[in-house]
Amino acid sequence: MIDNIFTALVKEKTPGVILEFILWCTVCLAALLSLIALAMGGGNVTWILLMLFSVGLAVLMAFRLKPVVLLYSVGTFYFIMLLVHYLCLSIGHYGGESHSPLNIVLFILALMLSLAIVTCAFIQAFSRFRLGTVLTILVLCDTALIMLLQILMYTAEYVVLASYLNSNHKMWMNYRGYWIGTVSFWILLAVTAVFYACFYWGPIDNRKEKIYVPGQRPAAAGFTPGLQGLCGNYAGRTIYLQGRSLTVGSGEGADVVIPDGYVSNMHCQIGFNRSTGFYEILDQSSNGIWLSDGTRLPRGVYSSVRRGSAISVGSNAQQFRLL
């Protein structure tokens, strides 16, 4: 089954999945607003770029391609943001209107931050280096700086140090659809920052944070992931994953049904990541998933577990080995 936000919302129901769904709905709203701005504003290129970006982001988020979402959001959206603010600076300059040193310094700082973000994002996605914390801090700082530039643009008539607005901007702000498109811009800016913060620091699962890692040793082609029952209801039996994640629980909707008082209706999900060679287990239960050394896996997040490990589902009465 293809992983997507809707099946995850039904089967997992973790805080991270719920947050992903809320952010996805927010991006869809931004796409709708940019479409309205495009229709009302007579095909302004900014609204076209925003609409294309938001539709692409919504598709990637719907299929939960989270590392691609992270790279796409900064690689594309930050280019749009810099283009907008570059136009704000350059048009006024060519029209004979001057800008304050504050505006120029802030724009150069935003440009440097954006270049650093894109560079770090590619390193994070395609190398062994882990720059998640650095990336999140840079994204939050750049988002705050972009919002400051926006505030200076809209309050330029009242702030002496911010001669950022010119006659062209004033004319644009009177166009139909301008403020609707601007709201779409702000929404996408906020979603990008929130997604980064929640991916690396919050509830959104970050187990698949790499798009490709050079030199990584995938699982052998002939290997078939599965669970081997050690004791309990499935002792001596082998259950193969068959390329999908299995749900384990006492309820009838589970793929592996274990009628045991210590096993929750939807106790856990078990999948296998061939690119890393690890099993990935999501504990959703009250009594937990336990390793043979007595360690309980964290609840509500995916945990990477080595092949050959023995796990207990709810209690020691139900044990499996990860093939």
Image (tube, rainbow, N blue to C red):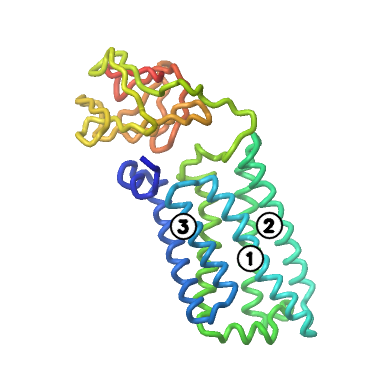
Q: Which residue is mark 2?
A: 114
Closest to the observer, 293 or 275: 275
Q: Secondary structure at mark 1?
A: helix
Q: Position of residue 77 (x, y in %)?
A: 60, 60
Q: Which of the 4 quarters of the picture holds residue 279? A: top left
- Residue at the spot of label 3: 58
Mark 1 touches mark 2? (CB < 8 Å): yes
**Mark 2 / mark 3, whichever is N-terminal:** 3
Mark 1, residue position: 81
Please tell me which of labels 1 and 2 falls first in the chain.
1
Earlier sequence position, callout 1 versus callout 3:
3
Residue kind at label 2, given as amino acid type: Ser
Furthest residue toward front: 222
| Amino acid at the residue labelled 1 | Met
Amino acid under label 3?
Ala
Q: Give the left or right position of residue 72, taking residue 292 as reference.
A: right
State how far apart marks 2 and 3 are (Cα): 22 Å
Residue at 51% from the left image edge and 72% from the top image edge: 183
**Is 222 displayed left or right of 173 in the figure?**
left
- Mark 2 touching mark 3, by CB under 8 A? no
**SS type, badge 3:** helix
Query: Residue 161 or 3: which is nearer the viewer?
Result: 3
Quick check: 71 above or below 100? above
Mark in the foreground, 2 or 3: 3
Q: Residue at x 52, y 78 (%)?
A: 179
Residue 267 against residue 320 in the figure, above or below: below
Q: CA distance from mark 1 to mark 2?
A: 10 Å
